[in-house]
Image (cartoon, grey):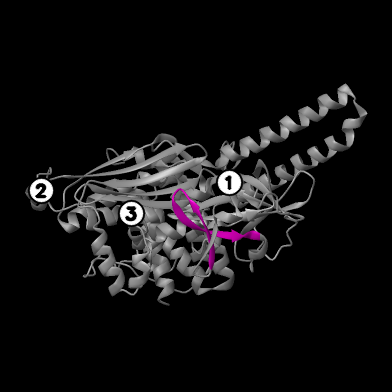
Amino acid sequence: MEEGSKEFLDTFLDEAEENLQVLSDDVLEYEDTRDDETLDDLFRAAHTIKGSAAGMGLDDISELAHSIEDVFDGLKKDELDISDSLIDLLLNSIEALEDMVEEVEETESDPEKDVSELLEKLEKAKKGEDISDVKRKDLADSPESAKKVEEIKVDVDRLDDLMNSVGELMITEKKLRGLLTPMEDDELETTMNQLKRLGEDIQHEISRARMIPVSQVFDRFPRLVRDTAKTVGKEVDFQIEGSDLRLDRTILDYIGEPIIHMLRNAIDHGIEKPEKRREKGKPETGNLILEARRERNLAIISVKDDGRGIDVEDIKETALERNVVTREELEEMSDNDILELIFDSSFSTKDEVTEVSGRGVGLNVVKETANQLHGSYSIDSTVEEGTEITMELPLSLAVVRCFLIRIGIHRLAIPLNSIERCVYVYEDDIEYLEGQDVFIYDNTEIPLINLAEELDYESDFEIDDDKQTVVVVKNAGDKAGLIVDEIDEVQDFVIKDIGVGKPKGIAGASILSDGKPAVILDVASLLGE
């Protein structure tokens, strides 16, 4: 194994395990179906193992995966025929790969397994020579097959199912407590408390099982930054902060792509070339910081550079050229609103297309990811000082802390990280502007949305001193006031997807302690994102 590679070992092992599972499952499926898509999956899995092993300096694993990949390539090109012996050889080779990867995991060093015979057989298979003497190893005779399993990988969907079940268990406990409380039995009360604690402990442990350090994503970026900076002729000092922060596995699966585009944008558009920085009195090497930190129940992911910053006037000019907004709309927008236009899919200030900048649609993925994860995004930039792009995301999607509100007989939940404040708005404070009710909040006119009308619910609101209860919500730079009948309490909810055809403004649903449903609001959708 190459020196300095151990810090990336966990990432390699995770990827290898996933791809080995694909190989094991799909070889047998391909034997039955001869499906081209399955063969493509097999080829990609072997190719990925080959490349990642080579990058770790694990040459024996890379060589064996390469030979397996060549066999799949021969099958793709119809140069080889499927036979029992070829399938047996592939299965034996995949099991050898599994043994080698396992040896690396246990010893953190190069595997010592001898696979020369397998390589010889694979070479003969690639040439179409006779391999009829290949036999499958009898796993029942293998002592390794009976070894103790200390760690297993669990699909996130299974953890979701467990979390849903625990949520329902805790709901049942609350209902049962309500039925039994009049009995005033001390032993029964003690038992109910034990049941409650047990449910909370299980919920906590499942949540912990889903939490993974962001380093598993962040540790891949130094190489990307180095290569990108070299491509565009810039010098960059890249720092990572907060890589020990733990996030839900589902969140981690989403954040890699937007961070890549944030980093590339900072290098390509933000940080100047050495000679330009010298002219401005800056150090030739630009600073680029990727940071993860926790604030309350949110994970803050930011990319900050000390480059040229973003000129609002340049954004205006480009926005008009690209027909992103009209001149009239620009006149009504604040500088911050104008800066956020760079997250539009059709926006770019880069005239030329390069392998780094692409076609100017990269930062749109930041907006899409934040909205999809019920989070938010923002940008702060000062000309000649630098730019910082930030995503605010929940720590977990398994349990979401929400404000419970009511509209008529309907109870709804608003994710807490989308709420800025709850206020009373009086009739005299409301104005009608360009087809929309607005009110003054922090010296700014923001839209007023009647949730009952928006969701087609019947409200039982009665005018009391001409005031209405309003929840001020936010997403990116947008804010709005949601008119509700009543604000209840803060609760933790396990969100359940309600499938296709969700109405605008609805993210999912959950079950309350009385067994009745509550709708979870999608603030980004309500604000038109």
Q: Closer to the observer: label 2 or label 1? A: 1
| 70 horizontally vs 517: left or right | left
By secondary structure, the bulk of the magenta-drawn segment is best described as strand
Q: Amino acid at mark 2?
A: Lys
Which of the labelled discs sits on residue 280, or is there none? 2
* Dot 3 or dot 2, earlier in sequence: 3
In what element is the residue under mark 1? strand
Residue identifier under label 3: 262
Q: Amino acid at mark 3?
A: Met
Residue sitting at x 59%, y 40%: 207
Circle 3 crowding by C-alpha within 10 Å: few under 14, some 14–19, many from 20: many
In the rendered structure, does residue 449 fall within the stretch colored magenta?
A: yes
Residue sitting at x 53%, y 49%: 418
Residue identifier under label 1: 423
* Dot 2 or dot 1, earlier in sequence: 2
Where residue 363 sits in the image (x, y, percent)?
36, 60
Observer-nearest of 143 and 4: 4
